[in-house]
Amino acid sequence: MGKQTAILKYLPGLQDILFLSIFAAALLLGPRMLNIDGDLPKHLTIGKYVLEGHLPPVNDIFSHTRYGTPFAPHKWLSGVFFYLAYRFFDEKGIILLCGVVLATTFTLIYSDGVKRTGVRLGTLLIVFGGAVISSLHWIARPHLLTMFLLAIWLIWSERLASGKNIPLWYFPVLMLVWTNIHGEFISGFLVTLACLGGWIWDFLFNRKETDFNTGKRLGIVLLLITIVSVLNPVSLRAWGTLTNWMANEYLMTHTQETVPPNFLQSQFMILLVFLAFSVFLLAMKQEKMPTRMALIMAGFTLLTLQSARNVHIFGVVAPFVLVGTMKGSLTVPIVKRYEDLFTCVDQARLKFFWPGVTVLIGIILLTTTSFGEIQRFSPDYFPVDATKWLETHPQDGEMFNPFDWGGYLSLYLWPEKRVFIDSQGDVYGEAFIREYEQIITLQPGWEELLEKHNVSWAIVPQEWPLAVALREAGWFEVYRDPTTAILVHNK
């Protein structure tokens, strides 16, 4: 019996398998996560700026077109975390950070689900499904940290709403961090509002079985997190920036990830199947779902159907709610048999052994094999070689650059050079972005707009029609590589 226990403690449990699978998937998707858009370098630039001893910037300092414009750095702390990882381990460090954050997020959801239901295999399958859905939006950006914080928030909120003892100060402390990490701290408010709304509903229609003290504690939490949400570099302006962006139809419809998911596209079939599976599980559930859970599931489903950018949040929220449908399945003999086996392994295993081994193996692979070499900013997407050339061949005057290249150029050329535009759309606003689109689509007046903004040189993708038009307009090409062209206005 002693030898059997000794062997079992080194076997991976289902929780360990989940952690390993998600961590490995994140590393395999690393090149895509680094190069899918231009946001990450902008966050690195802000993190670098703060770590150099500056306060988070509250006005734009990175562009020459909007210099001094009010700027809400509600992701500055994410930038610090990402830049620390980048500084010590280059792009590989960023992917390691993302892998650990993602794996830990879903491991927390799984672990809590097992505690609530006692069912391991069913919980694993549901949580793994949520991870697959969220992978549609796995990008090395601050929203991955939001997923982690949201998992914690859901677990704590459920304990609070179900009447269990949990210190109330946990919530404002976590919200204080979250407010400075990512604008999606709003999702924490939505969870709290759903819990409070569920309590109010139960109090109105089933007052005898509703604990008044629980509602009081939920109200206190809502008040506390509202207060601390303004403890950021720009106070209330952080809220204003988010609401103004969401209220602007032009900006929302011109940002690919903010439009509703198109289920005719193959990438969203996973989401559609999971939604159908969710309906099936909820319909088959024998016990009544708590009102708060129903509100959370309905609310975040609505947000996901409204905007594809919320799919990563749905991938965390949906499994958290749906694992509750597993309660009672232990009465099925075959389920009970396998659950006894998984429970035996889980109770004997070393809790942090396999996650630690997993991360260690990941570090070894990234540092000693060619696998680590592909975890980098790709010269096929970013102007990697052109930026190196500019570091030794700086151009005079103001530049023009693409939206997705602004952050990368700032990371390596700022403060000597300021960009025309970067991915911080709320800084530039609708009017300026319309001008930018007028230039890159060569609409009438595009040359006058370049003159208006004192542009004397441009760094643009080689294949853009704008590059051809600039040459035809007499601009002189000083640099070319397979990705990038740099052209100087021949005044």
Image: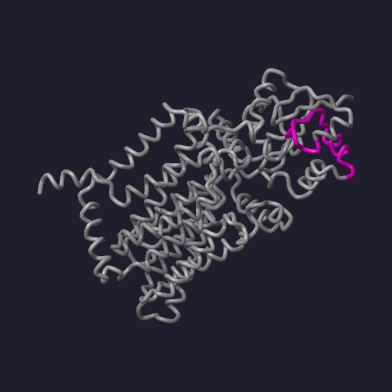
Q: Nearer the viewer, residue 70 or 305?
A: 305
Q: Nearer the viewer, residue 289 or 243?
A: 289
Q: Quadrant of residue 469?
A: top right
Q: Any magenta on residue 236?
A: no
Q: What residue lies at 55% left-to-right and 60% top-to-bottom? A: 269
For residue 475, above or below residue 178: above
Q: What residue lies at 63% left-to-right and 27% top-to-bottom? A: 412
Most extreme residue toward the top, as rendered?
A: 392
- Magenta residues span 444-466
Q: Please give the count of numbered marks on the rendered protein.
A: 0
Image location of residue 3, percent across then percent down? 12, 44
449 displayed left or right of 62: right
Q: Nearer the viewer, residue 289 or 63?
A: 289
Colour scheme of this structure image?
Answer: one colour
Q: Nearer the viewer, residue 425 or 119?
A: 119
286 displayed left or right of 429: left
The quarter of the image holding the C terminus is top right
Image location of residue 232, percent across then percent down? 55, 45
Image location of residue 314, percent across then percent down? 50, 59
Q: What residue lies at 85% left-to-right and 30% top-to-bottom? A: 471
